[in-house]
Amino acid sequence: MKTVQPIRDLEKIAAMKQVLMNQHYRNYFLFVLGINTGLRISDLLTLRVGDVRDTSHIIINEQKTGKLKRFKINSELQHHISDFTISKDAAEYLFKSRRGNDRIHRVQAWKILNAAAGEVGLNEIGTHTLRKTFGYHFYQKYKDVAVLQQIFNHSSPAVTMRYIGINQDIMDEAVDGFSL
């Protein structure tokens, strides 16, 4: 089974944004919302316009855990939401399929992300990459695994560190500097 990784390089994140924007604004917005909230793809894809427009928090019942999740929408993300939803009905899916009124599904989201990743030279990418990228960069900025553990609703800091790829970075660095 392939383990997906966070996107560690900010230039690669910018490149992904550009490729996705060139594909379709919806694809770009899916990426931006995912890497800025850390929500699971299953939760992102079920959002409706009214869940995110003109509000300070995204409030959902997590699909995986059934638990209530309340996530602050920062000001930059509010601008993205406003731009993306400006002419949309509150009841429609945020990530609507181009065919009909249904939402895109996990497989389609995976195809979108993988195609863009291929164009920018990334591998080990999947739908969890968005969530892991959020976590990785949140940790790099604040070094607060306890808050990140709460955001992700993980059972321990060790689970969170492994999930966001920090343990892998530590092992890679240690082995890089080791030689007999």
Image (tube, helix red, strand yellow):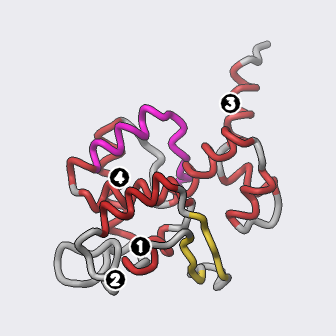
Task: Say what secondary structure mark 4 lies in.
Answer: helix
Quadrant of the frame with the C terminus: top right
Q: Which residues are magenta?
A: 1-20
Residue 108 found in image quarter:
bottom left
Residue 74 magenta = no
Please report whichever mark, 3 or 1, sits nearer to the chain's N-terminal start: 1
Decide which of 170, 32 is in the foreground and name it.
32
Task: For marks 2 and 4, give the CA distance.
Answer: 29 Å
Q: Which residue is mark 1?
A: 53
- In front: mark 1 or mark 4? 1
Relative to 113, 127 lies left or right: right
Instruction: Residue 153: give its label.
Output: none
Residue sitting at 43 percent across and 43 percent down? 123
Left or right, residue 162 beside residue 16: right
Question: Which three-letter amino acid code belongs to the residue tagged 2?
Answer: Ala
Q: Which mark is residue 90?
A: 2
**Residue 129 visible, this angle:** no
Circles 2 and 4: CB distance less than 8 Å? Answer: no
Residue where numbered disc 4 is placed: 114
State the residue at coordinates (21%, 52%).
Answer: 23
Crowd rating for badge 4 (residues with CA inside 10 Å; few <14, some 14–19, many 20+): some
- Which amino acid, mark 1? Arg
- Residue at the extreme top of the image, as rendered: 180
| Relative image position of residue 49 (x, y in whole percent) | 37, 77
Residue 4 in the magenta stretch? The answer is yes
- In whole angstroms, how far apart are the C-alphas of marks 3 and 2? 46 Å
Q: Residue at x 42, y 36 (%)?
A: 12
Q: Residue at x 30, y 58 (%)?
A: 27
Q: Residue 172: give its label.
A: 3
Mark 1 falls on what kind of element? loop
Q: Where residue 94 sits: x, y (%)?
A: 35, 74
